[in-house]
Image (cartoon, rainbow, N blue to C red):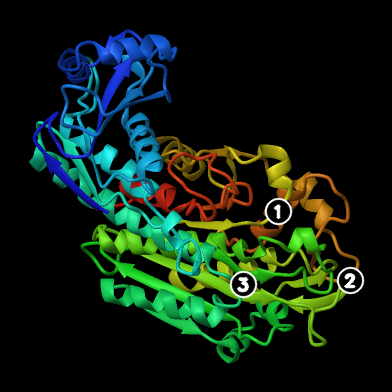
Amino acid sequence: MQITFTAPSLKGPGALAVAAFEDGLSPLAAEVDKATGGALKRAMGTNRFKGKAGQVLDLLAPAGMAATRVLLLGFGKQSAFDGRAAEKAAASVVGRLLTGAENAVTFAIEPPKGSKLKPGQLAAHLALGAQLRSYTFIKYRTKQRDEHEPTLANVAIGTRDVAGAKRAWEPMRAVAEGVFLARDLVNEPPNVLSPPEFASRAKQLSKLGVKVDVLGEAEMKKLGMGALLGVGQGSERESQLVVMHWNGARSKKDQPVAFVGKGVCFDSGGLSLKTGAGMMGMKGDMGGAAAVTGAMKALASRKARVNAVGVVGLVENMPDGKAQRPDDVVTSMSGQTIEVLNTDAEGRLVLADALWYAQMKFKPKFVVDLATLTGAIMVALGGEHAGVFSNDDKLATRIQDAGKEVGEPVWRLPLNEGYDKMLKSKIADMKNISGTTNAGSIVAAQFLQRFVDKTPWAHLDIAGVAWQDGEQRPLSPGWGVGWGVRILDRLVSDHYEK
């Protein structure tokens, strides 16, 4: 899909999108109403259209207009108009038209009076919403492909500041590319996306200037990564640790930021086998690693002025005769021993070694890990928020603020000694589960904190937000959402670029 920025026009080819608010039509929508002899207002009356946020009125082949259809988009109160609202509105239009008969759409939307958004910024947000909603994953379809093949090829966005729109769009376009990479990785079937294949795709970031190193099992064994290797020992496919470096700061010696991702490319539960229904969708248990890889692509694509490291631990958790057993004790890279009571609590074992490696190797300013870690976080927060746990109030607040800005909200949950005691083992330094059903997400975060060595750290449990079966999030078609790329990029751009 091609996105272009043009001067405001109501005469573009294909569909035309204009704005309405609860207190009336926008000036450009009023022009459309006049040109159609009042057809817009008549249609509003018969369809109970009040200009509320999220409402869409579709007027086909309006007389007096060159457009094939006019889409009137409700934005609610003018005072609530912002970039997020623009993104959602553009996404709703593209979602309607993507696989229909339309080839083109023109957005004729300008900031209302009093809006803090400049025309160029608004245009860029419209472009981002359109781009994110245009994503498809149809590479494996052979029948009925025409029903899923996009027909919408051109999106024109009218603005009084074309140059400003292009400047604002470039970094957003880079972030969208990172989101698409993360979605592709999550959507791939597990027979295709093995740990070595994931590593191979991460290596492609070298074309953007990212240095990519891949550690195999022999190298990880030398480093003492018994926790990570224990998870993957039941799989025929070799576990991998992928390390991505982007050095964009003015000084190559500047302390980096670090992101760590859980990359369980398929999770059967191991010998603590999941149910059949519980196993479906476990190809997405590498959503954290996908987000980290997508974020590294976004930072490199927009030439972010920061040094950043992305570390992803890639494994398969399978029930082979060589698989890890409940009651096994493994030794992590940190030297701490772990009694493995449940082989389905495997993501924390992968992260234990990946977190320690990132800190010891790179001495980062902070480390943020992302993981589809616990079903308990879905019980607590559903699919609306990711859970965030942190040992640093400033970092946690910055992550929360970034999430609000980009529409990837997080909710902070507690850590304290009482929860930590639930990990006490009778024979090792700790066990990997508490043995109760209480506070599962918190206990998992307490486990991870034992592998944090005085570094500012935050853990994002994204099990409830990494994928969706329906269309709950307007910017994301199902299945893989690519959650995490935007929040990490915004965290960096707001606070850590020089």
Secondary-structure class at tag 1: loop
Task: Answer whether residue 158 is visible to the viewer in this image.
Answer: yes
Q: CA distance from mark 3 to mark 1?
A: 18 Å
Disc 2 designates what residue? 427
Position of 264 relative to 53 (above/below)? below
Q: Nearer the viewer, mark 2 or mark 3?
A: 3
**Identity of the residue drawn at 82% across and 62% down:** 275
Q: Nearer the viewer, mark 1 or mark 2?
A: 1
Position of 38 relative to 245 (above/below)? above
Secondary-structure class at tag 3: helix
- Residue 491, horizontal then vertical, whole percent: 39, 47
Mark 2 Cα shell of 10 Å, populated few (<14), some (14-19), many (≥20)? few
Q: Nearer the viewer, residue 341 or 251?
A: 341
**Identity of the residue drawn at 84% across and 69% down:** 272
**Circle nearer the N terminus (1, 2):** 1
Are the residues flagged by discs 3 and 1 in contact, CB closer than 8 Å? no
Disc 3 designates what residue? 353
Q: Amino acid at mark 1?
A: Thr
Q: CA distance from mark 2 to mark 3?
A: 20 Å
Q: Nearer the viewer, residue 281 or 260?
A: 281
Disc 1 designates what residue? 374
